[in-house]
Amino acid sequence: MTVRNVRSDTWPRPVDFAPPPTGADLERWATADRDARPQRLARLRARMEEAGVDGYFGVRREHMRYLTGFTLAETEIPSAGNSGMFLVTPDDVRVLADNRYTIQARREASHARLFDCYNNLGERWPILLAESGVRRVAVEAGFVAHAMWQNLAAAAPGIELVPVEGWVEADRQVKEPTEIERIAAACAVADRALASLLPSIRAGVTERELALDLEWRMRTGGAEALAFDVTCLAGAEAALPHGSPGDRPVRSGAVLLFDFGAQVAGYRSDMTRTLFVGEPTSRDLAVYETVATAQTAAFDALRAGLIAARHAAPLPDGRSIDGVARASIESDGRWPAYQHGLGHGIGLATHELPSLGRSAAATPLPSPTVFSIEPGIYLEGETGVRIEDLAVFDAAAGTLELVTRFPRDVVVVGS
């Protein structure tokens, strides 16, 4: 892939991207969630019946919202106690909430019954199960601390706790149309924010200043929150796949890597762009083109897989697509390929199923779904390049559509 240089007269502009969602959009999405919850719960109950359990105890904030409508910000989890945890039975949903959250829970989870619990789950657990008629309960084991598990087992010794993982995650990876809309809206917030930031990038400004500026532009441009903390890394620091911005000044002739995302109506975006401050070096341009070529190879393999699926072939799996991108870099022979995964699903969580990487399941990708494609090359002490876009993978439509719209071309700033 040959990428073109984009300079200030042809920079992407905020108006090139979709505007923030309206109040009507937010209400429509909320209605869609309310309408979808009975089907989501029905799928979980079918899984419960198949496994022979009469209860499902959930603790993950994403699952709270997906199945009950109750919302908690990530920053609230440490102080929320047991509020937001929930119990699904064949004919009921109980949401735990103490008096700090009862008004909110009645509004957001109006179909569920509230169960008063203030950080005393062990004490209240036998009562919750007795009122619900549960004898064998599936528990989200990967997100329950060992001490809590022991407390629950001791509090109700006659109840069997069944450790389960991945039930709701597997359901959530297949996206409903309005879920995809919200991810696309979050991408547009991020696209606009970076486009508006470009004129402010110059030699001498620090990574931390740019990260804060980009955060402000997302928060004032339609994001209800950040998907995660903004990464802004200059020059050799860009070789850290998950570095943090510091007081290091941007230098002319070096790369500048941004990894960031917005949250809109609960759903996230995730995007990485590596920009060039001043005239790029020939080495950095070559690294960039190698990464862009690898990303294009992954896109091409996914589209080829969709075409093959029309003729009864299985859809590609995340492990094979990672192999395509990795092989593209390795065949170039000049630099080592990334050691992280090629991509991850995204939605109510920034990282969720499906996975695209060397350890990903060798099973067909789900559809429709949304995931990132983010190859990179990292040269310690020298430079780093990563390009990340979100793609909607839809076998029924036979399409792979990028919802990250910011160009993948070489963008030169600060000159």
Image (spheres, rainbow, N blue to C red):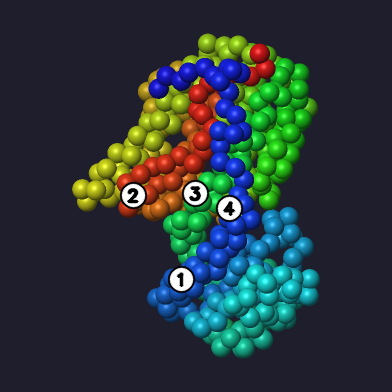
Q: Classify mark 2: residues with Cα within 10 Å, few (<14), some (14-19) or many (20+).
A: few
Q: Amino acid at mark 3?
A: Gly
Report which quarter residue 284 is drawn in.
top right
Question: Closer to the camera: disc 2 or disc 3?
Answer: 2
Which amino acid does the dot numbered 1 rest on?
A: Gln
**Tag on residue 397?**
2
- Residue 122 x %, y %: 70, 78
Nearer to us: label 3 or label 4: 4
In x, y percent, where is residue 256? Answer: 64, 24
Can you tell which of label 2 and label 4 is closer to the viewer?
2
Residue on which disc 3 sits:
345
Question: If the image is split into quadrants, where does the C terminus sit?
Answer: top right
Q: Earlier in the sequence, mark 3 or mark 1?
A: 1
**Counting residues from the N terminus, which is met first, the one under dot 2 or under dot 1?**
1
**In screen coordinates, is 222 left or right of 287?**
right
Going from the N terminus, do you reach mark 4 or mark 1 first?
1
**Location of residue 247 in the rendering, given as x and y in whole percent from the top left corner:** 78, 27
Q: Please report whichever mark, 2 or 4, sits nearer to the chain's N-terminal start.
A: 4
Badge count: 4
Name the element at disc 3: strand
Answer with mark 2 or mark 3, whichever residue precedes in sequence.
Answer: 3
| SS at mark 1 in the image | helix
Name the residue beneath numbered marker 1: 39
**Apparent side of residue 153 relative to residue 249 in the rendered image (left or right):** left
Q: CA distance from mark 4 to mark 1?
A: 20 Å
Secondary structure state at the residue bearing disc 4? strand
User: How far is disc 3 from disc 4 in space, using C-alphas?
Assistant: 12 Å
Position above or below: 227 against 144:
above
- Please report contact status of discs 3 and 1: CB closer than 8 Å, yes or no: no
